[in-house]
Image: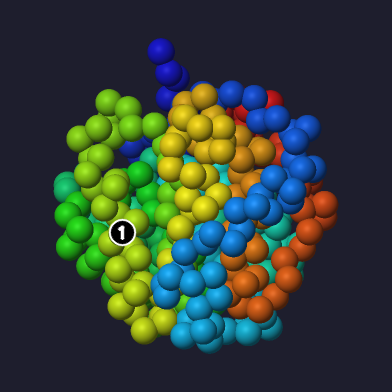
């Protein structure tokens, strides 16, 4: 039986973190080589190579503060992403929420989560002043395609009001277990809805398709899911940090720090990996 893991920032009824497998720290030094082959497959709002001309409104000097949003999957990706961005000269704030994080105001449960997310976003905008808001589509983005589009458009307006650009990245493939089964349709439609919002934004929203990194099969080795089939341990999270910072670099015209400068740092001992059973 899977053991639920409690994180302080999530309501007890919403926890979905599970025990994971070994993280494989020995392979972290090979992150750059392991991800290089997939970096050119990233989707954007214009279907291009990650550097949409219509969306490239910020320069490297302007991209200084990145607010990271999402659920516990994004939370597991946050430690190396923070290390990679800081090594690249950008401030980072992790606003991912275990057991939540969605902005989609769909059914009753998702609506409760979304209410908390919007409140947290308002506080984070006021205190952190991000110039890039990066939202990873969550496992809780439940609702119809219309509801998803409306919520992503609302997020885009909030980012614009805050003086920030919005980047939406699709979630990695994850195990559709009994809990997620009834939401499978919404889980599949969410990234499509996000891309539609980006395509119609006139360059104000970017969409990045993370299947370029993970593939689409959560059971495949490329997906680098932990034994729970949902989260990633240190190695997978580092691969994502390398991929994502490279996409930001392409979009905003800066060169991210090499993995050798951050991939084996103190973040590898983050307590969330211990709770996932990573070693």
Is residue 218 visible in this depiction of the protein?
yes
Q: Going 65% across and 71% down the picture, which residue do you hit?
A: 249
Q: Is residue 152 left or right of residue 93?
A: left
**Residue 10's spot in the image, x, y percent?**
40, 41
What residue would you read off at disc 1? 192
On the image, which quarter does residue 178 sit in?
Answer: top left
Q: Is residue 198 left or right of residue 234?
A: left
Residue 117 picture location, percent across and down: 36, 57
Q: Quadrant of the C terminus?
A: top right
Residue 92 position, x and y percent, is 62, 63
Is 187 placed above or below 149 here? above
Instruction: Work out which quarter of the rendered image holds the N terminus and state it.
Output: top left
Q: Is residue 97 visible?
A: no
Q: Secondary structure at mark 1?
A: helix
Which residue is situated farthest in the top direction here? 1
Q: Looking at the picture, tell me which residue is in the foreground, 95 or 153.
A: 153
| Placement of 224 over or under 277, stated as above or below | below
Q: How many marks?
A: 1
Left or right: where does residue 111 sit relative to residue 124? left
Q: Residue at x 29, y 46 (%)?
A: 187
């Amino acid at each position: 039986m899977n053991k639920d893991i409690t994180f302080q920032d999530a309501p007890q009824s919403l926890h979905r973190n599970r025990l994971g497998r070994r993280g494989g720290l020995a392979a972290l030094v090979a992150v750059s080589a392991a991800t290089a082959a997939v970096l050119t497959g990233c989707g954007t709002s214009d279907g291009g190579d990650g550097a949409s001309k219509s969306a490239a409104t910020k320069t490297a000097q302007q991209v200084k503060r990145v607010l990271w949003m999402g659920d516990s999957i994004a939370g597991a990706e946050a430690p190396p992403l923070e290390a990679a961005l800081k090594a690249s000269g950008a401030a980072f704030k992790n606003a991912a929420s275990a057991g939540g994080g969605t902005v989609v105001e769909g059914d009753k449960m998702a609506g409760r989560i979304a209410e908390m997310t919007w409140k947290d976003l308002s506080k984070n905008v006021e205190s952190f002043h991000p110039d890039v808001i990066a939202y990873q589509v969550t496992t809780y983005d439940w609702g119809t395609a219309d509801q998803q589009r409306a919520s992503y458009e609302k997020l885009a307006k909030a980012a614009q009001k805050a003086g920030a650009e919005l980047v939406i990245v699709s979630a990695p493939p994850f195990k559709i277990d009994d809990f997620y089964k009834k939401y499978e349709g919404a889980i599949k439609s969410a990234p499509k809805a996000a891309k539609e919002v980006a395509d119609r934004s006139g360059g104000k929203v970017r969409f990045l398709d993370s299947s370029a990194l993970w593939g689409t099969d959560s059971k495949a080795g490329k997906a680098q899911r932990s034994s729970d089939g949902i989260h990633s341990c240190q190695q997978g999270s580092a691969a994502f940090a390398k991929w994502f910072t490279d996409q930001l670099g392409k979009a905003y015209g800066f060169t991210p720090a090499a993995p050798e400068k951050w991939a084996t740092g103190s973040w590898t001992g983050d307590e969330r990996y211990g709770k996932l059973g990573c070693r």
